[in-house]
Each structure stands twice: as C-alpha cells, then as structure tokens.
Image (cartoon, helix red, strand yellow):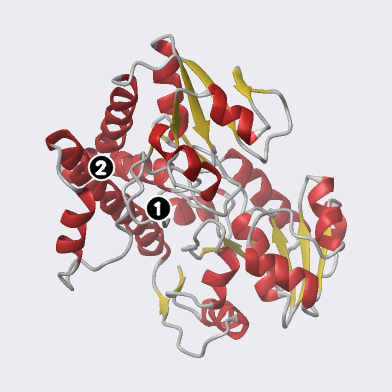
C-alpha cells in the first residue's frame, strides 16, 4: 500500500520504518536535518532498532519536508504522529498542531483513512470527525518505550485500533505484518474506549513508578535498605519483579501529560487515586531536593538530563523541577549532558569535560548510575538500586 506518515519523532519514525518493510511510505517532517539523515540511512534519534533498520534493511521509505509530495502518491492510509501537550492553564491537551495536520490530510489525501497515533483526550476522535463532517479519522494508540520504539512495534504487547470495521482490521493487519512475531493480540474497539485504554495504561505505569518511589522515600527516611524491601515485595507474582527501580519521578513524553489529562477527564467523576498519582510525583521531587540539600552543597552537579540509560531525550525530565528547587535555595547547579553542545542550558552552566565536572561538584545527582561516575561514588546521590531503567 501507499502510506503517508506525518511527524518523525519516536512514534512517527518507528511506525514509518515498521510499515516501510512491506509498503511504500512517504514520511513528512518539518525539520530538514531529520529528513536528510533519514534519507541517508541515519537515525536522528537514539533507538538501536531504528538505527539498524535504516542502515541495513531494504526499506521503502522516503522522508520529505514537501507537503504536496508527501501526500502526492495517493495514500490509502495517513498515519499522524503530531505532538500534543497538556495545557495546565486550560486543563486539557493542546491539540492545535494535530488539528492543523488533520486539516492538511483531509484536503490533500481525500480518499485516505487517517489514523491518529498522537495521544488525545477521551472522546476526541468522535468530536473531531463531527467537527470536520467526516468519518475518515480513526485512532490507534501506541505503547512505546523511549529508545525502544521500533522494538516495541516489532514485538508489540498489543495492537489496538479504535474502530470496529474492515478498514480498522486492514490497518491492524499492516501493523502485524511488520512485526517480527506471529503472536500479536489485536483488539478492535470504539474510538472512545481506545482513547481511554491509552490514558489508563500510562496512568497505571505512573502509579507503579510512584508506588516504588514512595516505598523508597519511606526506606530512605527510616534508614532501611530499599533493595531488600523491593526484592521481597516483587517476588509476589501478582506484583512482579519488573518496572520497580526507584527514580527521581516519572517524566518523558507521555506520563506527565497523560496523567494530568486522565485527572482532567475525572473532573466530574469521584476519585482519590488518580489525583494522588499526579500529586505523588511532585512530592517525590520535593523529597529528593530536600535530601540533596541536607548535604549543604555549594555546587551540585547534574549527571545527565536524560533520565534513562541509553537515551537522549530529556523532555519533561523530573530532574528539571529538582534543579529549580536547588537553585531557589542558592545552590550553584552545573550540568553534564553529552548531547548538549552549548556552554549554557536554560540558565544553567554546562560542563562538557567529565573530569572537570566531577572535580567541581560537591554532590553529583544521577537518576541512573554510570561507569562515568563510579570513581566518585562517595559524592553521588542516586536512588538507582538495580542499575537498570
């Protein structure tokens, strides 16, 4: 089939690569540098499988910044992975970029089924079809990990499409055809339920992060061994020994905005737990800041803004709120982040030399421990007990 993919972040690029194994894919992106890299077989994002597939596989993928060309091969499907973000002032997702992209797709691909891969509020697909007087827009949620986006499409936990129809089954089949496993659960359901699945899934993951973080807060406050407690708790098969490594809080592309959106959807629904998940993340970051300040440091070094090992994404990272709280207390904050090339980032000094960084820092704050700072472990503050994401 001819397919157009719009937006080449983690979601869009991983989908474009997956689908281009067996289909002709044109990928639209506004950043020329990304387009050039992809067309040269180089990934613009850090993702092992995407890097390998672009370099080694025979993909039918062409990236472009030209909108008319991107839609010009009469695509049967248009997959949209435009960014949406939570607007704290309006207490709702900002979908303006997505809607501009939908208008382009409706105009330039008049026969295509348009599949939204962006995260959206519950009920959005139904409302947007009514707004544009169409039935061509459907929703299919993504469940991708940062840095493992293509892997999670090759070995998907499930494929969900928000419509019970032949065209929804066709799109699900395209996703399954691109997978590297024959064992894929496929669910077709109404769009509003599919939207709810996405938000409830991410809110549960945030709940799990928050639970183990609060366990760790208790253990650190009481002088207990966090790892021993988590090991014992996690051996219960109903709980499981996974996704349980303490951190400075949940962050990234999805969990902060999705939990806030979930809470907004509960505006007229009784709840305690959903509100607690959002509040817990702020409490955790405040606790981490207070623990660092107890050391009375003059200079705090932030080892990596990216909160996950082998990641180059630090969007909405928990560390930013901690840095603000430290600076508000008069602490000098310096960053070591290899992906930054400038001497300054958002008003914070950047140190590019790891040895100078270690020498100048009284306390080094690291969400995940690394060999780079093992030799100064005595000045490292981390809550990483498993040396894993």
Q: Position of residue 213 (x, y in %)?
A: 26, 44
Label 2: element kind: helix
- In this orientation, which residue lies closer to the viewer: 227 or 106? 227
Using the numbered discs, state the Cα–Cα distance from disc 1 to disc 2 in whole angstroms: 22 Å
Looking at the image, is 39 positioned above or below residue 157? Answer: above
SS assignment at label 1: loop
Choose top left, top right, bottom left or bottom right for residue 134: bottom right
Vertical placement of 362 versus 172: above or below? above
- Say the numbered circle drawn on residue 123: 1
The front one of 191 and 282 is 282
Q: Residue furthest front?
A: 375
Q: Which residue does the image show at 48% across and 56% down from the upper left?
A: 125
For label 2, the crowd category at 10 Å Cα-Cα, with few meaning under 14, some 14 to 19 and many 20 or more, is many
Q: Disc 1 or disc 2, which is closer to the eye?
A: 2
**Residue 68 x/y as whole percent:** 86, 55
Q: Report if residue 269 is visible in the image.
A: no
Q: Is residue 55 visible?
A: yes
Residue at the (31%, 65%) spot, across then down:
242
| Residue bearing mark 2 | 277
Compared with 152, 97 (above or below) is: above
């Amino acid at each position: 089939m001819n397919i157009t993919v719009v937006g080449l972040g983690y979601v869009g690029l991983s989908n474009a690569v997956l689908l281009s194994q067996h289909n002709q894919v044109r990928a639209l992106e506004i950043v020329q540098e990304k387009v050039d890299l992809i067309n040269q077989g180089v990934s613009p994002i850090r993702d092992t499988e995407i890097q390998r597939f672009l370099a080694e596989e025979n993909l039918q993928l062409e990236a472009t910044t030209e909108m008319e060309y991107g839609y010009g091969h009469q695509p049967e499907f248009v997959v949209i992975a435009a960014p949406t973000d939570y607007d704290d002032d309006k207490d709702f997702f900002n979908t303006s970029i997505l809607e501009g992209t939908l208008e382009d797709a409706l105009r330039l691909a008049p026969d295509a089924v348009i599949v939204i891969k962006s995260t959206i509020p519950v009920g959005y697909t139904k409302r947007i079809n009514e707004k544009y007087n169409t039935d061509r827009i459907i929703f299919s949620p993504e469940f991708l990990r940062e840095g493992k986006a293509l892997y999670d499409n090759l070995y998907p936990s499930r494929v969900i499409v928000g419509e019970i129809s032949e065209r929804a089954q066709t799109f699900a089949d395209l996703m399954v055809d691109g997978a590297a496993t024959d064992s894929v659960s496929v669910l077709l359901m109404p769009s509003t339920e599919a939207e709810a699945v996405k938000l409830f899934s991410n809110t549960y993951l945030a709940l799990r992060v928050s639970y183990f973080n609060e366990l760790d807060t208790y253990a650190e406050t009481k002088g207990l061994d966090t790892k021993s407690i988590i090991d014992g708790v996690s051996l219960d098969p109903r709980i499981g020994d996974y996704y349980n490594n303490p951190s400075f809080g949940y962050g990234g592309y999805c969990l902060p905005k999705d939990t806030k959106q979930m809470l907004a959807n509960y505006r007229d629904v009784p709840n305690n737990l959903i509100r607690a998940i959002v509040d817990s993340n702020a409490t955790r970051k405040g606790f981490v800041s207070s623990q660092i300040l107890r050391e009375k440091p003059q200079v705090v070094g932030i080892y990596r803004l990216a909160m996950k090992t082998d990641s180059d994404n630090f969007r909405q990272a928990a560390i930013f709120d901690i840095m603000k709280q430290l600076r508000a207390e008069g602490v000098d904050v310096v960053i070591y982040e290899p992906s930054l090339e400038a001497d300054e980032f958002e008003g914070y000094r950047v140190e590019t030399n790891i040895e100078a960084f270690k020498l100048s820092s009284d306390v080094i704050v690291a969400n995940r421990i690394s060999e780079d700072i093992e030799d100064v472990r005595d000045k490292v503050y981390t809550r990483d007990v498993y040396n894993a994401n």
